[in-house]
């Protein structure tokens, strides 16, 4: 059992050990100050019991994901909901601040959805998820770094960019609107439709679903992907 | 349980769920790719026969070692690429092709040294070396394309490393195929040509594959 757990730990991305987020379940040897030293049997039972609970939880996630691969929606939603805490732990470990955690969670969930066929139920689910979450966290940190280099802090911006006259602000606004319209026009049809119906015409999900003939789930996913594509594109252009 | 803001996305993904066919194990996918290499080899053997290759190997055993190293490099590099394309697998897999690659390069270098010490009549010319270059690159393109296509079915989270392994695997496989119809002994120009061809394939795959493989 110990060997299995070590094998799974070694498969996690660099420097990430999911177990140490939960100190109650970590392996360890009790150390006593007095003359009483616990017997080896006692130590074994202390370390084995929480670890088995932990392993049981992971096995449960692995079983849910295996069922999800076969199309079990309830198991899929359970495993995704159960994964959120793990993704946040991995993202924090990679150095992601609190502000960016939700983005990493969402990006990781979308990636998990796209690549769920790559999960092998005979291997650790947590290691598989941890690798994807770690990569998405690194991507997000790089994105933040790029944006940080382009953006100015408020006080510097105020010093360097005093108010311009209305005409130049109008021109800039028009230019931004044109770039946004162009970027929306280049989206794939499903994503463009979601932005137009939900974002521009401000229809409700039910109205947009009735109008487009798509289900609300597809519309939400398309909108999320469209916003990511637009964010990437507009950030890349500026 | 997740917070409500993630629950909306989870519900949406759940609504989109359809059954998926699980990815085959990396070793089995490696065998699939090697089947194409074997098909190319069978065509070349049918055309050239194995006699010239065995004759050259009898005269210079280091050539046989180099070919053996190249075969192992192709197998291990492809296996490592397929394994690393599955999230959660150890990065140590990337080291797997290193020992066979050292054997391949080392034995080729030995052949080159032998020719330099005792030059024979069959030293390749630059023109013949250019043929080798075209051959290796010509075979590497379809082999790389198939590998990239297969890897895109998985999820290479380190696309540059995956592309490097793709380049190494396809260049080594092409060098093996060249061995079947290679009429010349190893020489400095020959080794240099191999190194150049491998370098071009690895660089092209790394440059293109980095983007080709990073859709996830």
Image (spheres, rainbow, N blue to C red):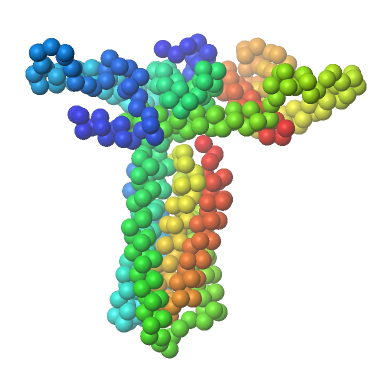
Indicate whether B151 appears above or below B39.
above
- State left or right for residue A44 relative to residue B123: left
- Between B176 and B14, the one lying in front of the other is B176
Q: How many labels does the image show?
A: 0
Extreme residue toward the bottom, this view: B121
Q: Does B60 sit above or below residue A157?
A: below
Residue at 47%, 52% in the rendered image: B164
Q: Position of residue A98 (x, y in %)?
A: 51, 17
Q: Can see residue B206?
A: yes
User: Residue B183: x, y in percent?
Assistant: 43, 80
Compared with B17, B166 (above or below) is below
Q: In this view, does B75 lie above or below A57?
A: below
Residue A89's spot in the image, x, y percent?
42, 21
Residue at position x 68%, y 30% in the image: A150
B50 or A180, which is in the foreground?
A: A180
Q: Horizontal placement of B132 versus B105: left or right? A: right
Image quadrant in which you'd find residue A187: top right
Residue depicted at x 54% and y 21%: A100
Give residue B107's quadrant in the image. Answer: bottom left
* Percent coordinates x, y for residue B78 in the rendering: 39, 53
Q: Which quadrant of the figure contains the N terminus of chain B? A: top left
Which residue is found at the position 47% from the left and 56% from the top?
Answer: B167
Q: Could one spot residue A214 in this view of the protein? A: no
Q: Nearer the viewer, residue A90 or B83?
A: A90
């Amino acid at each position: 059992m110990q060997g299995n757990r070590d094998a799974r730990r070694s498969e996690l991305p660099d420097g990430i050990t999911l177990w140490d987020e939960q100190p109650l379940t970590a392996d360890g040897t009790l150390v006593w100050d007095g003359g009483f030293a616990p017997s080896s049997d006692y130590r074994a039972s202390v370390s084995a019991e929480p670890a088995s609970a932990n392993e049981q939880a992971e096995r449960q996630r692995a079983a849910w994901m295996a069922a999800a691969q076969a199309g079990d929606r309830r198991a899929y939603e359970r495993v995704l909901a159960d994964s959120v805490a793990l993704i946040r732990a991995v993202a924090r470990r990679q150095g992601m601040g609190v502000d960016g955690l939700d983005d990493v969670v969402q990006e990781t969930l979308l990636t998990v959805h796209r690549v769920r066929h790559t999960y092998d139920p005979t291997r650790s689910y947590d290691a598989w998820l941890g690798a994807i979450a770690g990569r998405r966290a690194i991507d997000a940190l790089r994105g933040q770094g790029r944006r940080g280099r382009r953006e100015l802090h408020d006080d510097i911006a105020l010093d360097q960019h005093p108010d311009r006259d209305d005409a130049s602000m109008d021109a800039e606004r028009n230019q931004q609107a044109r770039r946004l319209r162009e970027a929306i026009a280049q989206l794939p049809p499903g994503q463009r439709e979601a932005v137009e119906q939900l974002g521009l015409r401000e229809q409700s999900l039910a109205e947009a679903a009735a109008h487009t003939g798509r289900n609300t789930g597809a519309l939400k996913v398309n909108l999320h992907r469209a916003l990511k594509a637009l964010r990437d594109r507009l950030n890349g252009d500026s | 349980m997740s917070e409500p803001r993630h629950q909306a996305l989870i519900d949406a993904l759940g609504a989109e769920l359809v059954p998926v066919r699980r990815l085959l194990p990396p070793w089995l996918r490696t065998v699939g790719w090697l089947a194409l290499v074997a098909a190319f080899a069978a065509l070349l053997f049918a055309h050239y026969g194995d006699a010239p290759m065995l004759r050259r190997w009898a005269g210079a055993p280091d050539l046989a070692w180099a070919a053996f190293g190249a075969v192992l490099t192709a197998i291990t590099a492809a296996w490592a690429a397929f394994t690393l394309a599955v999230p959660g697998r150890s990065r140590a897999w990337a080291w797997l092709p290193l020992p066979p690659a050292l054997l391949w390069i080392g034995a080729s270098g030995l052949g080159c040294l032998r020719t330099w010490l005792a030059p024979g009549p069959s030293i390749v010319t630059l023109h013949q070396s250019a043929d080798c270059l075209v051959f290796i690159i010509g075979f590497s393109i379809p082999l790389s394309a198939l590998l990239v296509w297969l890897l895109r079915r998985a999820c290479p989270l380190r696309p540059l490393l995956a592309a490097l392994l793709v380049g190494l695997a396809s260049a080594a496989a092409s060098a093996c195929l060249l061995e079947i119809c290679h009429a010349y002994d190893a020489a400095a120009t020959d080794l240099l040509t191999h190194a150049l061809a491998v370098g071009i394939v690895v660089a092209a795959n790394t440059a293109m594959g980095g983007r080709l493989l990073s859709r996830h």
